[in-house]
Image (cartoon, grey):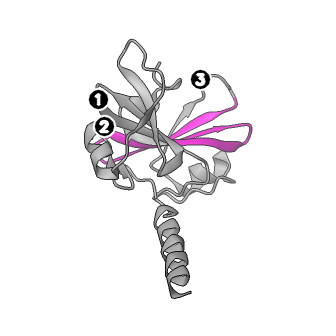
Amino acid sequence: MKKLILMSFMLIMSSLVFAEEIVLNYNSYGPIEFGTDIKKVEKLLKEKARKSNRDETGCYYVTFKRFPKVSFMIVEGKVKRVDVGINNPTILNIPVSFKLKDVKKMYLNVNIKTHTYDPAGYYFVFNNPNKTKAILYEYYENKIQYIRAGLKPEVEFVEGCL
């Protein structure tokens, strides 16, 4: 009976470790820093990346079991960008319910760009101090639809690797 209780406790604790909430920032997604070689990331996570189709430019996406709802853009073998769900917290703490007027009012440092495909939509780009990295919110249909962060220029690529 003690063995069953101990095993149950260990299972619960291990699931809590992997259920960690990661706050996206300018430099990293959890332990994965932008600019890191993908082989080093695999070693760090003790897990092989699952790759999407590589295109002719050397750009592709990977996922990890540890982060099932997150995609990492790899360019020339290095992590350049991460695409996360809208409910993933960021250091900016922007609620997904925020409208354009809210973002303009609350965040004076935001660079607002017109959306490529929706003239009523926008990209809210928050650059780090030296403008080499950014957190980007994609806004259209009156709400935030996507969040990504990483190195420039890749973080601002509209169609993933294109």
Q: How crowded is mark 3: few (under 14 residues within 10 Å), some or many (20 or more)?
A: few
Nearer the camera: disc 3 or disc 1? 1
Q: Are marks 1 and 2 in contact (CB under 8 Å)?
A: yes
Residue where numbered disc 1 is placed:
77
Can the viewer see residue 148 in this picture? yes
- Numbered disc total: 3
Is residue 73 within the magenta segment? no
Mark in the foreground, 2 or 3: 2
Quadrant location of the N terminus in the rendered image: bottom right
**Is 124 placed above or below 18 here?**
above
- Residue 59 % position (x, y): 39, 22
Q: Give the magenta range.
A: 120-147
Cα separation between marks 3 and 1: 28 Å
Q: Is mark 3 on a helix, strand or loop?
A: loop
Which one is in front, 140 or 36? Answer: 36
Residue located beneath label 3 in the image: 116
Q: Position of residue 121 (x, y in %)?
A: 66, 33
Categorize mark 1 by other alpha carbons within 10 Å: few (<14), some (14-19), many (20+): some
Picture quadrant where residue 80 is located: top left
| 144 horizontally vs 43: left or right | right
Say whether residue 146 is left or right of residue 110: right
First in sequence: mark 2 or mark 3? Answer: 2
Asked which secondary structure carries label 1, the reply is loop
Residue 125 in view in this figure: no
Q: SS at mark 2?
A: helix
Secondary structure mostly taken by the magenta-highlighted segment of the chain: strand
Q: Which amino acid does label 3 sit on?
A: Thr
Residue at 68% from the left image edge and 25% from the top image edge? 119
